[in-house]
Amino acid sequence: SQQGEEDPQALSIQEGENATMNCSYKTSINNLQWYRQNSGRGLVHLILIRSNEREKHSGRLRVTLDTSKKSSSLLITASRAADTASYFCATAGREYGNKLVFGAGTILRVKS
Amino acid sequence: KAGVTQTPRYLIKTRGQQVTLSCSPISGHRSVSWYQQTPGQGLQFLFEYFSETQRNKGNFPGRFSGRQFSNSRSEMNVSTLELGDSALYLCASSAGLAGGHNEQFFGPGTRLTVL
């Protein structure tokens, strides 16, 4: 089952532009995580934001969380070709037995 | 610290066979989770082990099983393979209990093809 849904499904931008990906989920959560995956390889953890937090930064990444709208966004500023990857949001909450449930992902392509 | 390692990286089996995949977590991590990734179903949680005990289980048939050893290394087994079991199997380790409490560190995955 997939609790999170990313939007858009695919995004193509020029190097240097900002990329914004959105994630919506259905139930209450403990926290939400964003991961990156390059070409069918392992996932890399980007950011974990807890349900009582509204915004978090890590380098060129900015994540927001709106629990009233059950949504999160990931912003990548000044994108680089190396940012080309699939990005997944993952949530965990009591209704899913606290296991991590991933969305379908957004495929980001950064053109140089 | 060495990352999460998975063996083998690639595997080809035929229907009806069984397969065992192995995962070595980051040193000191006691939690290991397994996921199946397919183009159609995406990333789906299989199970989580912590200190040799299964703590959580996804919605998969009993053909999928796993275990964790005292050194935190984990194996998962799939018996009576079906074509639909072809997937990338990912293992992830975490310092504490996984789920939503901690970030997970993923291995490179085992690509299983069932013919």
Image (cartoon, grey):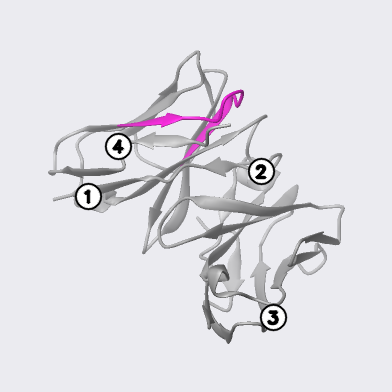
- Quadrant location of the N terminus of chain B in the rendered image: top right
Q: In the image, residue A25 lies at what x, y percent?
A: 66, 63
Q: Which residue is mark 4?
A: B8
B56 in magenta: no
**Which numbered marker is on residue B113?**
1
Along the viewing direction, whichever of A48 and A96 lies nearer the viewer:
A48
Tell me which chain the residue with mark 4 is part of. Answer: B
Magenta stretch?
Answer: B21-34
- Disc 1 residue type (three-letter): Thr
**Which numbered marker is on residue B60?**
none
Q: Nearer the viewer, mark 2 or mark 3?
A: 3
Residue contact between numbered discs 2 and 4, judged by CB atoms under 8 Å: no
Tell me which chain the residue with mark 1 is part of. Answer: B
Give the distance between the C-alpha atoms of the residues marked 2 and 3, in whole angstroms: 25 Å
Q: In the image, residue B28 lies at what x, y percent?
A: 61, 23
Q: Earlier in the sequence, mark 1 or mark 2?
A: 2
Q: Image point 40% across, 53% down: which residue?
A: B37
Q: Which residue is mark 2?
A: B103
**Is residue B56 visible in this depiction of the protein?**
no
Tell me if A3 is positioned left or right of A62 in this view. left
Q: Image point 13% across, 50% down: which residue?
A: B115
- Disc 3 residue type (three-letter): Asn
Q: In the image, residue A92 lies at what x, y percent?
A: 66, 48
Q: Earlier in the sequence, mark 4 or mark 1?
A: 4
Tell me which chain the residue with mark 2 is part of. Answer: B
